Image: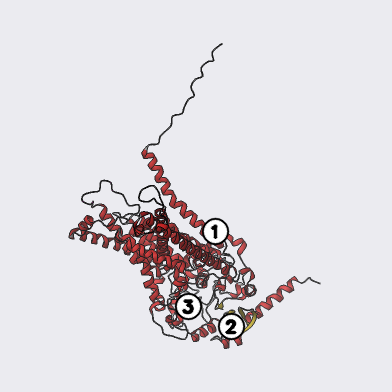
């Protein structure tokens, strides 16, 4: 038989074994990608929750949203903050809103422009001062310099407010509140990312993820992140500065301190409150300096296989290193470096603050700093509307939010026990103590200040939850271990005697039982806390969705009918000034309780200003209280709309103009005989 031809052996591809350097590089790439993925998931969860909130159609979200958009409305109509519009807050946030609305109007002008009645306005398109030739609505009697700067004869003002100026045309358009609210959403994303980076770099990936998730479902967070208010933008910018300090290592040119100072300067130019975080920034700078110093001072004798810390500023206490760092020359050098770093941070903060204020408002905030000082620190001069003492910190808020408070207490205990391993464990408790020290003593206390407590509280709570979970897992593993003889024999309780208490088998079963009880308690707490958090988030969304919406606001339709004949409107629901695009009288646009307490605005002055400006439209809440300008309201105005929430009054002369224009339109539309 013919023998079969031998088949050639199949070619076998050589197996490529990756080199250790390549494997370690691939592992580092995977490890570095994890935080990016986690941040993307957390931000996706935030935007998913926010998609259920009617950002475009809700009339108002948040208590102080009306103040911010009313200031922007006046700026869009050519008025200036501080010199015309009373304002006790820095200008940067208002400037950002104004730029967004201008850009929005330029892009959508073909769809959003509404008809106007130019004859009802001053020759330059800006409402004129009653009884004067000045266009400034906020100029006080006798202030000739402000009248001159804002008069018709000033060529700069005439050019800025001429009919051919596109900015002035934007001021006559209708604006959507979606843009300002999306600005807050962007700052919220920055806030969440900043919190995650800070906690991740100090406490690890799991604690950072849990902290950010807890902050996302904390009380009032969704409402505050959807409202055009100052709290989240200013806090997010300051936390971005802290994140820079945590991430960037110390360098010769102090780049981290410079960038942190710039970010803190921008935060302070939106609201001064985040400046309370400067001591925390100083603590982080000190920890960075200490870590950098200890890195250059190896212990004696050096460890044969040192285990590097996974986080910056994570080196523990070393006796040899501490002794070396306490040498007089080294301590003096360290103190000098710390002083220089803090000086660079402070100078950068001040320079950024002054430069941006000059850039956007020509230094108006610093020039009129007395408005902010008298509002915040001027003392109480009028008790007619209460006092700041009536709005003290509510300690019950910590009990109401037990789902964060209970694990936060455990977390602080764990962090205190870890101080012997390294001083970075003090950061969350110090942050929480600093926030409590500031806001429990600050009066007035408003509910949206809770966001400042929520960040360190969530950090401590995340540490406590991770510790509790690890303890339960370790207890279960210990309880399922073997006995002393290594054969896995279980102890029988029927032969219980005194020596059994000391047997490893009994200890294992006791540990297993404790772990089981701990697991049950943790499960019950987790279910209750998750249900409470979910209910809280759902209630926030439901409350905003059930609030008044623009498409159902009949009062805005009545205002739109009179808008062509209206120069000013006054309302105690000032967000309607933005939706109607009709400015408030500049002295009356921002009247918070602080201004009333300081005596800068009184009922008598309110009546005087309204008699001077004579706004064509007055919108008030439908309640039984009598307003200080009741006589003016009864003689010069007529009620034209009323529902369960609002009363709308129009000046009698304005109604005559509207009726005459309506009759003229009907005459034109009538068919000729």
Mark 2 surroundings: few (<14), some (14-19) or many (≥20) residues within 10 A = few
Quick one: SS at disc 2? loop
Residue 37 in view in this figure: yes
Q: Looking at the image, which residue sits at the far right?
A: 673
Is residue 214 shown in magenta? Answer: no
351 shown above or below 598: above
Is residue 453 toward the left or the right of residue 611 in the image?
A: left
> To which residue does mark 1 refer?
48
Residue stretch rendered in magenta on the structure: 298-308
- Earlier residue among tags 1 and 2: 1
Quadrant in which residue 322 is drawn: bottom left
Q: Main secondary structure of the magenta part?
A: loop
Mark 1 surroundings: few (<14), some (14-19) or many (≥20) residues within 10 A = few
Question: Which marked residue is nearer to the observer: mark 2 or mark 3?
Answer: 2
Residue 70 at x, y percent in the picture: 52, 72
Quadrant in which residue 346 is drawn: bottom left
* Nearest to the observer: residue 411 or residue 594: 411
Task: State which quarter of the image contains the N terminus.
Answer: top right
Residue 435 at x, y percent in the picture: 38, 69
> To which residue does mark 2 refer?
623
Spatial CA distance of label 1 from label 3 is: 34 Å
Spatial CA distance of label 2 from label 3 is: 19 Å
Quick one: SS at disc 3? loop
- Earlier residue among tags 1 and 3: 1
> To which residue does mark 3 refer?
592
Residue 578 at x, y percent in the picture: 55, 71
């Amino acid at each position: 038989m013919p023998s079969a031809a031998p088949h050639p052996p199949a070619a076998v591809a050589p197996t490529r074994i990756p080199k250790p350097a390549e494997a370690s590089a691939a592992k580092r790439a995977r490890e570095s990608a994890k935080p990016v993925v986690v941040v993307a998931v957390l931000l996706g969860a935030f935007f998913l929750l926010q998609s259920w909130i009617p950002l475009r159609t809700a009339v108002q979200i948040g208590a102080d949203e009306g103040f911010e958009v009313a200031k922007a409305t006046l700026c869009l109509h050519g008025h200036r903050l501080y010199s015309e519009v009373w304002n006790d807050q820095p200008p940067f946030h208002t400037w950002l809103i104004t730029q967004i609305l201008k850009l929005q109007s330029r892009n959508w002008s073909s769809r959003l422009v509404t008809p106007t009645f130019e004859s009802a306005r001053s020759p330059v398109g800006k409402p004129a001062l009653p009884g004067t030739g000045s266009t400034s609505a906020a100029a006080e009697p006798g202030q000739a310099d402000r009248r001159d700067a804002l008069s018709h004869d000033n060529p700069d003002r005439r050019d800025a407010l001429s009919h051919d100026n596109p900015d002035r045309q934007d001021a006559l358009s209708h604006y959507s509140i979606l843009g300002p609210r999306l600005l807050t959403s962007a700052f919220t994303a920055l806030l969440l990312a900043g919190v995650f980076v800070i906690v991740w770099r100090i406490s690890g990936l799991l604690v950072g993820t849990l902290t950010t998730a807890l902050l996302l479902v904390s009380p009032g967070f969704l409402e505050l992140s959807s409202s055009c208010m100052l709290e989240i933008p200013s806090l997010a910018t300051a936390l971005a500065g802290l994140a820079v300090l945590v991430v960037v290592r110390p360098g010769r040119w102090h780049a981290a301190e410079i960038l942190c100072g710039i970010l803190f300067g921008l935060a302070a130019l939106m609201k001064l409150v985040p400046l309370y975080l400067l001591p925390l920034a100083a603590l982080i700078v000190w920890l960075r300096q200490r870590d950098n110093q200890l890195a250059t001072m190896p212990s004696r004798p050096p460890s044969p296989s040192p285990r590097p810390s996974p986080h910056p500023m994570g080196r523990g206490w070393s006796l040899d290193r501490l002794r070396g760092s306490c040498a007089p020359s080294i301590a003096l050098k360290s103190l000098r470096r710390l002083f220089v770093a803090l000086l660079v941070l402070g100078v950068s903060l001040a320079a950024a603050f002054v430069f941006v204020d000059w850039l956007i408002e020509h230094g108006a905030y610093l020039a009129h700093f007395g408005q902010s000082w008298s509002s915040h620190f001027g003392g109480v001069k009028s008790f007619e509307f209460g006092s700041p003492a009536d709005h003290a910190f509510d300690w019950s808020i910590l009990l109401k939010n037990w789902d964060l408070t209970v694990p936060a207490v455990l977390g602080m205990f764990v962090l205190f026990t870890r101080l012997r391993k390294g001083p970075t464990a003090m950061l969350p408790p110090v942050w929480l103590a600093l926030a409590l020290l500031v806001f429990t003593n600050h009066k007035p206390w408003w509910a949206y200040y809770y966001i400042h407590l929520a960040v360190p509280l969530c950090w401590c709570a995340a540490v406590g939850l991770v510790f509790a979970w690890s303890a339960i897992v370790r207890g279960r593993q210990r309880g399922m271990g073997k006995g002393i003889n290594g054969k896995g024999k279980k102890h029988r309780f029927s032969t219980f005697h005194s020596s059994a208490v000391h047997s490893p088998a009994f200890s294992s079963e006791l540990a297993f039982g404790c772990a089981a009880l701990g697991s049950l308690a943790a499960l019950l707490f987790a279910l209750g806390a998750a249900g409470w958090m979910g209910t809280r988030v759902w209630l926030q969304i439901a409350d905003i969705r059930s609030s008044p919406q623009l498409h159902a606001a009949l009062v805005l339709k009545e205002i739109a009918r009179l808008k062509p004949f209206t120069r000013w409107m006054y309302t105690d629901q000032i967000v309607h000034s933005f939706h109607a695009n009709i400015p408030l009288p500049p002295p009356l646009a921002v009247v918070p309780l602080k201004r009333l307490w300081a005596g800068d605005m009184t009922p008598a002055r309110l009546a005087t200003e309204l008699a001077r400006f004579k706004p064509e439209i007055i919108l008030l809440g439908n309640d039984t209280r009598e307003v200080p300008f009741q006589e003016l309201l009864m003689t010069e105005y007529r009620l034209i709309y009323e529902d369960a929430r609002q009363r709308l009054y129009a000046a009698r002369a304005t109604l005559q103009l509207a009726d005459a224009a309506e009759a003229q339109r009907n005459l034109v539309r009538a068919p000729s005989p």
